[in-house]
Image: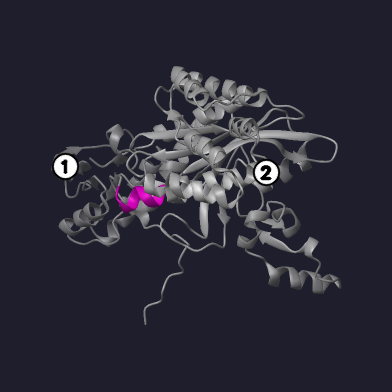
Amino acid sequence: MARKSLSGFPEWLPDGRIVEQFVLDHLRHTFELHGFVGIETRAVETLDELEKKGETSKEVYVLDRLQAVKDAEAGRGHSKERRMGLHFDLTVPFARYVVENANELDFPFKRYQIQKVWRGERPQEGRFREFTQADIDVVGSGELPFHFEVDLPLVMAEALSGLPLPPVHVLVNNRKVVQGVCESIGVDDVEAALRGLDKFDKIGPEGVTAELAEAGIEAGQAATLVAMAQIRTSSPEEVRSGVAALGVSGELLEEGLDELCALLEAADRRLPGTVIADLKIARGLDYYTGSVYETEIDGHEDLGSICSGGRYDSLATDGKRTYPGVGLSIGVSRLVSRMISIPLVRVSRKVPAVVVVAVIDEAGRVRSDEIAARLRARGLATDVAPSAAKFGKQIRYADKRGIPFVWFPGQAAEGGAASTPDTVKDIRSGGQVEADADTWIPPVDDLVPRVEAVG
């Protein structure tokens, strides 16, 4: 009887894993180019820590059995404070890490973190119960300059734009703009306004208007908020003129507009057309205090945001000091799932090996292993044929895996006959040349599996 796989726990086939590793290596490289240092935190946090971010507490995988055994062995009760669960994002453990290690860290502290997280939500396309996230954050001690709110989305845009994907746009908004508009028109319940605006893409302007009315927001106020939500542009001038047309003003609003426009201006200099102001973005504005970011792929808007984040004025606190931060998080598994399911990319081969060393007969396997060792010592990923079958079958072994080269060991001299040299065959073109394991180099494009855009 076939066993049904667990939904929500992705397991890629070898070529899918190559795509995932390619994405992770590229992200890691880009982050390090910009001065971020990698860290890793434990997979387990106390429930007390995890439930500080209350809206996701219902999604936590609780380690009841593990903790019950430990408590029983220690002869203590099963207190909530000591119960543990798997982390559902990397922000909560990072905040704890900052507080616990503040005396050893240099601020502003720039970190990237790439790890698995677990979330007990209903699986669906692009949403998993176990998945990989890639985060970047900058955290300060007491203060954090605004320019980091400009730098981080551009780092992430650079990272995503370097992948074989359709054009990627970072959508930005600012809590101060939304709150400033609410203050100007007399909306006191900003959180209710945010909840309504957050549904804009799903229910449209009429639906949002109805949602706002149910929350007690008057028709005129709702009309202004809906008009604000339809401002989307990469032009700072158009952002300002669009907001001015709403007939709103205020000190907080102006501060938010200055920050939002500064971000757009910097983005236009460094990555033109990549960053777009979208004033309907509301998700996260209930806890972010400045800029907020979401990311979409052209032609794949149905996937939703593959990367999001923003500014926290209080990412972490130890009661004496506050640590403000700004950061973004990529749902790597969500992105990889779309890349391989459409597919958006293709992989040149399913294995790392660039060459297979043929085996003439089992007695000569030692010779094939020796050749492979010499190639590997020079950094060339090498496989050895699993059996001394006919050469045609050994070539098919390589071809099935996409391995481009097959190495044929030469024959040692016998009875005065001349030795025959080793040769290597490019099974794509059929070309075969003499080769030495200490000097042969495959073409650069063949050294590692290539991940390329389809089309």
Circle 2: element type: helix
Q: Is residue 126 magenta?
A: no
Q: Residue at x 49, y 41 (%)?
A: 307
Q: Is residue 43 visible?
A: no
Circle 1: element type: loop
Q: Quadrant of residue 275?
A: top left
Q: Residue at x 38, y 48 (%)?
A: 302
Side of 85 where 410 appears, left or right: left
The spot of residue 161 in percent (x, y) is 40, 32
- Around disc 2, counting alpha carbons within 10 Å, would you say few (fewer than 14), some (14 to 19), or many (20 or more)? many
Residue 94: numbered disc: 2
Amino acid type for the residue under numbered disc 2: Phe
Disc 1 from disc 2: Cα separation: 67 Å
Q: Residue at x 29, y 40 (%)?
A: 453
Front residue of 203/78: it is 203
Front residue of 183/63: it is 183
Foreground mark, 1 or 2?
Answer: 2
